[in-house]
Amino acid sequence: MKEIRNLTLTELAALLKKKTDEINKSEPLDGVTKFRLHQQNRRYVHFLLARITYHIEKESHVASNFQTYISREINKPFEIEHLWADKYERHQLEFSSPEAFAEYRNRIGGLILLPRGFNQSLGVNEYKDKVKHYYGQNLLAKSLNEQCYINNPSFNQYIQRSQLPFKAFPDQFTKQDLDERQNLYQEICNQIWGMDRYKIS
């Protein structure tokens, strides 16, 4: 606080740039790599998914409202949806134990937001059945479905402009697919909060 007290806007900007330059930026927002949902961070994970969803919709010129994604006051508030049902037996070839599966299942790359009710209606369905219904939802959910990339010029232009590794997963969602999706979320987070956004000319 003492360092920034009484600084002009130009001086403050220069000081903040100096401080951010001192941060190790070799792996921006690296904490997202294995970030996952657990009992103590549900609200933060919800916020992060809402922020990611809002950002990609805004950048794709889709009508969006961040407050809608985080509000508990609307009729059907958004809730965290796991792409994988809590069924270890479906994933035994990829995971050596239920604990390893549970840890991966909760990684943010395997999560989206869906309205209450719709979220519950999908229940323990397999991914290949769930993904068909994601197309009618927000853009982050919709991007899992191959239809999202057809006749959608604004979204496709955003992908081209941002070079983000969006792709559809129409039939299955494997451990490797979740890793790819986790990487996508990390890159979106870096686009939102990365240091390159704060360059001062």
Image: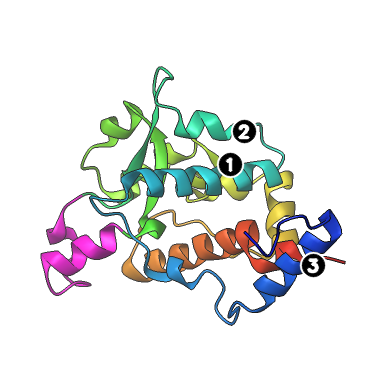
Task: Quote the CA–CA distance across marks 2 and 1.
Answer: 6 Å
Secondary structure at badge 3 equals: helix
Residue in the image at 62% along x and 33% along y = 64
Query: Vertically, is 18 above or below 63?
Result: below
Please rate how many residues cluster around mark 1, counting C-alpha atoms within 10 Å: few if below 14, some from 14 to 19, many from 20: many
Type of amino acid at the residue the image marks with label 3: Ala
Name the kind of residue labelled 2 in the image.
Answer: Ser
Q: Could you tell whether 119 is left or right of 179 in the image?
A: left
Q: Quadrant of residue 195?
A: bottom right
Q: Quadrant of residue 54?
A: top right
Q: Which residue is mark 1?
A: 54
Q: Residue at x 51, y 46 (%)?
A: 140
Query: Which residue is rendered at x = 46% and y = 47% of the image?
Result: 49
Please indicate, yes or no, whether residue 152 appears anywhere in the rendered image. no
User: How many residues crowd around disc 2 within 10 Å: few (fewer than 14), some, or many (20 or more)?
Assistant: some
Work out whether mark 2 precedes mark 1 in sequence or the reverse, and give the earlier one. Answer: 1
Drawn side of residue 136 relative to residue 164, left or right: left
Q: Earlier in the sequence, mark 3 or mark 2?
A: 3
State the extent of the magenta-drawn residues as a range. 86-106
Image coordinates for residue 157, horizontal then vertical, percent: 74, 53
Mark 2 lies on residue: 64
- Check the image and report above or below for 41 versus 31: above
